[in-house]
Amino acid sequence: MELAEAVLAGDRLALARLLTQVENDTPAGRAALDRIFPHTGQAHLVGVTGSPGTGKSSLVNRLAQLYRHPKNGEAPRKVAIIAVDPTSPFSGGALLGDRVRMRDLAGDPGVFIRSMAARGALGGLSRTTAAAANVMDAAGFEVVLIETVGAGQSEVEIARLAHTTVVVEAPGMGDEIQAIKAGILEIADILVVNKADRPGVENTQRALRAMLEMGHPARGATGETDELWLPPVLCTTATSGEGSEEVAKAVDRHAVYLKRSGEWQRRDSQRLRSELELLVQQALMARWRGGVSEERLAELVARLRDRQITPYAALDELI
Amino acid sequence: MELAEAVLAGDRLALARLLTQVENDTPAGRAALDRIFPHTGQAHLVGVTGSPGTGKSSLVNRLAQLYRHPKNGEAPRKVAIIAVDPTSPFSGGALLGDRVRMRDLAGDPGVFIRSMAARGALGGLSRTTAAAANVMDAAGFEVVLIETVGAGQSEVEIARLAHTTVVVEAPGMGDEIQAIKAGILEIADILVVNKADRPGVENTQRALRAMLEMGHPARGATGETDELWLPPVLCTTATSGEGSEEVAKAVDRHAVYLKRSGEWQRRDSQRLRSELELLVQQALMARWRGGVSEERLAELVARLRDRQITPYAALDELI
């Protein structure tokens, strides 16, 4: 348990080592995760997602700087960045503009940056990301920014880990991409149109507002608007920093809303429940694998391949 | 079993109804899947994947037309199209240019088109797509084109279902997207640069060839080149149809290679094995859920939320 204790004490090297254990899903990593769990539940988990090329990394970078150097005289907050790359299941590369970040945030002990690539099975990435967020949380980071590239289902799953999900768009994307947004919009707590110096910003903003209204027709019509959250659509130019402060403020307002409405606890429970169900699934599959020989499994697969048995018949023979 | 029998007899309405059962994962659908399983294993499953806006739908459309109206005097082949939309887990919409297809392929009994949207959990989409491909296969379609939008991990999973994976690119995409390709390239059996009438085609083609060579450094150097498959990089203009025939020919050549090298059987076994493992997982989880009350689970989640127990302690109480 040395590693877990060192992480809880704020040791950055231990933190990096534990994250590697978590990524590789080692028994030691799992034990350490269980050890640090009672110290989680403090951080604000913020997902930032969007298609490639929308400038998510720049925005995340700006937000981190604002948390470190608040302009309104507030105390700086410790911030962790988890950059998730679900598009490279084989290479394990880190693509998400780390070098740019390193230049601006390097040497600040209140910032910790980690890139995570997909390994192994589908669903593995969201498990690993959830675990990494827990580690950052237990290590005392007050805001954990979880950045995911792309607009696929895995990103949606990852966004669900967060208390607050920021969806970043850029003006002037094609119709197909516009349509794709419909799904992504349903998970957005805050919408950002980045690259607001480019033409087409107003159109994009208008289209997003229209989609939001379609997606939430009841909002504002129930007479309980103070209990509801209508996702704001904000404009930023992340390269110059313009608009980033408004995004940071909206993220803070959303945290207040979540806590006041009970939604924070509900989202936490939902996340913990699916983490628990994944643990159950892993444990059941591990137990099953321990009871069946590789030869037996290979023999059944060969009979399936030759269409001598059906999948359910094979299942009956297996469990 | 009436539904399964009707599908095997070539009834299109029954086929559409079974696909709906499969999408909704009903007990009747599962039973029918098991019934038709012995009739699968004949079709060539071809995955077509790529980022939004690369023109995958047009290419798939062109390929379907070529299979229906072969120019070299061969017999027409029955072709099914499964258009997978993993980006819309909530809306269940079908975005993939179906209207264009309808116009060109409508009324041809040798063509069947189905859009599938993600439902439920991660991994659900690849299971549903695999099942739908099996249904098309059993119904006598000789080529099953599985089209996936996006470049995320779910698409990679879906591509793994196929015997042959075609990755479609377009010239002039940004650096971030270029980098993302590295992961996608490792699953490509055939690479297509679509929109070859646009500037930058040579650059894109050259970049893809360079990436392929990096990814497969041993290829061509082993002295066994006749046993290996070096993914071709082909150019098309899907709107005019130019180059589509070369893609269709490459797909056929790949099928010959797969069968000669034993790779066809290996890929089939791999797919059937993961389908079987998913069935085991479903069965184990269903059995577990049957033995635990919702109250018990909710109570454990509440204790987790309040950090009174750790996830592993909760697991110990559950199984």
Image: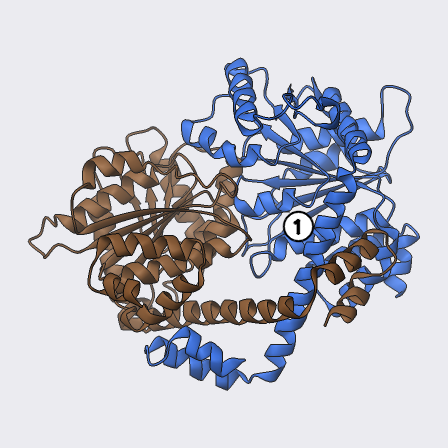
Chain colours: A brown, B blue
Q: Position of residue B117 (x, y in %)?
A: 62, 51
Inspect this view and state whether residue B134 appears.
yes
Of all chains, the one bearing label 1 is B
- Please identify the quarter of the rendering in which residue A99 is found: top left
Q: Give the residue displayed 86% in from the left and 54% down from the top.
A: A307
Element under disc 1: strand
Label 1: how many Cα within 10 Å (few below 14, some 14–19, many 20+):
many
Q: Is residue A284 left or right of residue B72?
A: left
Q: Is residue B273 left or right of residue B175?
A: right
Nearer to me, A315 or B239: A315
- Please identify the quarter of the rendering in which residue B275 is found: bottom right
Give the amino acid at mark 1: Met
Q: Which residue is mark 1?
A: B116
Q: How many marks?
A: 1
Quarter in which the N terminus of chain A is drawn: bottom left
Q: Position of residue A39 (x, y in %)?
A: 27, 70
Q: Is residue A169 left or right of residue B204?
A: left
Q: Position of residue A262 (x, y in %)?
A: 32, 74
Inspect this view and state whether residue B55 appears.
no
- Relative vertical location of residue A28 with respect to residue A155 in this rendering, above or below: below
Q: Give the residue displayed 78% in from the left and 30% down from the top.
A: B257
- Please identify the quarter of the rendering in which residue B77 is found: top right
Quarter in which the C terminus of chain A is drawn: bottom right
Nearer to me, B186 or A79: B186
Q: Position of residue A91 (x, y in %)?
A: 49, 38
- Relative vertical location of residue A176 with respect to residue A18 in this rendering, above or below: above
